[in-house]
């Protein structure tokens, strides 16, 4: 019997912020805004792909900070405690993860030392560039799904409009591949469509 695999993604937050040009520029002005933007991008990506995702921000050099965890549906945001790096938190997470046998664990970072540690613990590495490509691809897929949904709503609305009005259906033609509606022979003014 084939086991269902759980997909887990761990992200070294500050490493990704510094690796992605757009976030690095925002971080130069305001680091909190860069964190917020990364959280939103990853949240959308995780929710769309159904991946259990954890973003780890380290507080290695911050005095008096305790471990703080914020959770939403598919995203967990972790701020490590004082004197704990994101690398050590990720290493401990992989080691202690109880469903490791039935999970695909990936870690996104550009830190070569952390990537080697991740491979040694049995997880897969993901560079910042690879993660950015996956996030952008998910964004495109979401936009495509929205366009298809909007086209379907438009098509149904026009079907209802044609049934409720004497406007003949034969003048309407849907081109599903282009998500457009065209009129034959008559313009909207000639057919007296409501505006």
Image: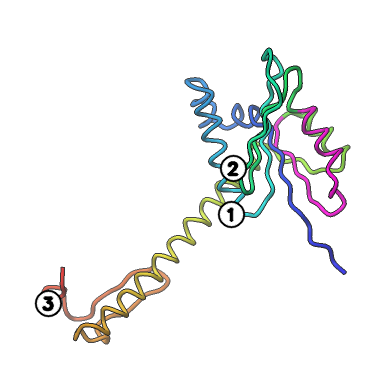
| Residue located 38% across and 68% down the image | 179
Judge from the rendering whether residue 41 lies leftward or rightward of residue 84; answer left or right.
Answer: left
| Helix, strand or loop under label 2 | helix
Question: Magenta region: which residues?
Answer: 87-110
Q: Residues within 10 Å of mark 1 (few under 14, many from 20)?
A: some
Q: Is 69 above or below relative to 188?
A: above
Whole-percent x, y for residue 48 in the image: 58, 54
Q: Is residue 96 magenta?
A: yes
| Helix, strand or loop under label 1 | helix
Question: 59 or 194, which lies in front?
Answer: 59
Whole-percent x, y for residue 68 in the image: 67, 29
Which residue has dot 1 on it? 48
Q: Is 118 above or below relative to 98?
A: above
Residue 64's quadrant in the figure? Answer: top right
Residue 70's quadrant in the figure? Answer: top right
Tell me the number on the disc at residue 42.
2
Specify the quadrant that holds the C terminus: bottom left
Q: Earlier in the sequence, mark 2 or mark 1?
A: 2
Whole-percent x, y for residue 157 in the image: 32, 74
Q: Residues within 10 Å of mark 3 (few under 14, many from 20)?
A: few
Q: Is 165 above or below relative to 117?
A: below
Q: Earlier in the sequence, mark 3 or mark 2?
A: 2
Q: CA distance from mark 2 to mark 1?
A: 10 Å
Specify the quadrant that holds the N terminus: bottom right
Tell me the number on the disc at residue 192.
3
């Amino acid at each position: 019997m084939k086991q269902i695999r759980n997909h887990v993604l761990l992200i070294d937050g500050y490493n990704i912020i510094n690796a992605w040009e757009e976030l690095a520029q925002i971080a130069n002005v305001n680091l909190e805004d860069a964190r917020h933007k990364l959280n939103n991008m990853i949240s959308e990506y995780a929710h769309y792909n159904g991946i259990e995702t954890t973003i780890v921000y380290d507080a290695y050099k911050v005095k008096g900070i305790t471990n703080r965890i914020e959770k939403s549906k598919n995203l967990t945001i972790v701020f490590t405690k004082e004197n704990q790096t994101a690398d050590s938190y990720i290493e401990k997470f992989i080691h202690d993860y109880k469903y490791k046998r039935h999970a695909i664990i990936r870690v996104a970072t550009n830190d070569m030392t952390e990537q080697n540690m991740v491979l040694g613990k049995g997880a897969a590495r993901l560079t910042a560039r690879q993660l950015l490509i996956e996030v952008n691809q998910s964004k495109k897929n979401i936009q495509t799904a929205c366009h298809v949904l909007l086209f379907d709503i438009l098509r149904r609305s026009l079907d209802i409009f044609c049934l409720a009005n004497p406007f003949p259906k034969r003048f309407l033609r849907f081109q599903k591949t282009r998500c457009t509606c065209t009129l034959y022979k008559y313009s909207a003014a000639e057919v007296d469509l409501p505006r």
